[in-house]
């Protein structure tokens, strides 16, 4: 937000402030990315362009720099895309995977374009929840047939809270859409949560606070990745 990495807290964006990380000093995006990659060789980095999502500017230049400095890193970027033109323009830039947030109320034609995309830069859908309430059109939540292969389950009220993920919601969505790859986001406290998320049907997880506060170590991440690889071979 406004060119800096911020600490997300419960989806209350007016309260977001520049991050204070235990991994490095400052809130520069390149420094934060370097620190995360020094901790563990992540293959993907999720970026929410808060200004673009709120239709109040853009951090496109920062995202472009991340792509230039870390060309091996997949960027998963939510920039508030809400129509086909915006989606196609993003795909044409070739700098990362588009994340389509349900809170942006994607139109029917956009959902069709996202689900039918066979681009190597596969798009993702973010199912956005605030507490018990779904942010988006109910039909989108009710019909997994509208979802692309990769889906983020974003629990906004839990982001930055360290109060634990919503395992029940993830289990229910996994039951309804067993062939989708679900990524849990919000509230993750440590390695035990990662293990339970895997048992609840998560294909992966988005981590921030637990990493910056050093609650999850490199060895925790390696163990989690090893377990995931073992399950995928079974």
Image (cartoon, rainbow, N blue to C red):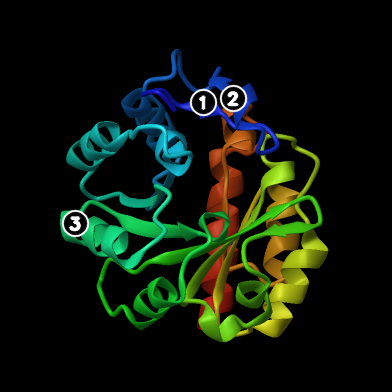
Answer whether residue 188 is visible to the viewer in this image. no
- Disc with the residue nearer the chain's start (3 vs 2): 2
Eyeballing the image, is 217 above or below 141? above
Mark 1 falls on what kind of element?
strand
Quadrant of residue 97 within the rendered picture: bottom left
Estimate how packed mark 2 is, as few (under 14), some (14 to 19) or many (20 or more) residues with alpha carbons within 10 Å: some
Please name the residue that numbered disc 1 is placed on.
6
Q: Is 30 displayed left or right of 226 in the figure? A: left
Q: Position of residue 95 (x, y in %)?
A: 22, 51
Mark 3 falls on what kind of element?
loop
Which quadrant of the figure contains the C terminus? bottom right
Please name the residue that numbered disc 2 is placed on.
16
Q: Looking at the image, which is closer to me, 136 or 223?
A: 136
> Decide: marks 1, 2 in contact (CB < 8 A)?
yes
Quadrant of residue 91 within the rendered picture: bottom left
Q: Is 166 displayed left or right of 5 in the figure? A: right
Q: Position of residue 18 (x, y in %)?
A: 51, 18
Eyeballing the image, is 225 above or below 59? below
Q: Position of residue 207 (x, y in %)?
A: 57, 44
């Amino acid at each position: 937000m406004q060119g800096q990495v911020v600490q997300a807290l419960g989806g209350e964006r007016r309260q977001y402030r520049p991050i204070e990380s235990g991994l490095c000093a400052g809130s520069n995006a390149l420094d934060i990315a370097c620190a995360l990659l020094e901790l563990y060789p992540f293959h993907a980095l999720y970026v929410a362009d808060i200004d673009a999502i709120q239709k109040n500017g853009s951090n496109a230049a920062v995202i472009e720099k991340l792509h230039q400095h870390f060309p091996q890193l997949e960027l998963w970027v939510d920039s508030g895309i809400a129509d086909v033109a915006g989606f196609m323009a993003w795909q044409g830039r070739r700098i990362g995977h588009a994340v389509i947030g349900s809170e942006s109320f994607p139109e029917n034609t956009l959902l069709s374009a996202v689900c039918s995309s066979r681009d190597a830069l596969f798009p993702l859908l973010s199912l956005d929840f605030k507490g018990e309430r779904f942010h988006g059109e109910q039909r989108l939540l009710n019909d997994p047939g509208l979802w692309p292969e990769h889906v983020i389950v974003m629990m906004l009220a839990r982001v930055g809270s360290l109060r634990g993920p919503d395992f029940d919601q993830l289990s229910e969505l996994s039951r309804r859409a067993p062939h989708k790859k679900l990524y849990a986001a919000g509230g993750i406290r440590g390695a035990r949560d990662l293990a339970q998320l895997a048992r609840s049907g998560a294909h992966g997880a988005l981590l921030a606070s637990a990493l910056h506060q050093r609650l999850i170590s490199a060895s925790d991440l390696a163990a989690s990745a090893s377990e995931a690889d073992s399950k995928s071979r079974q």
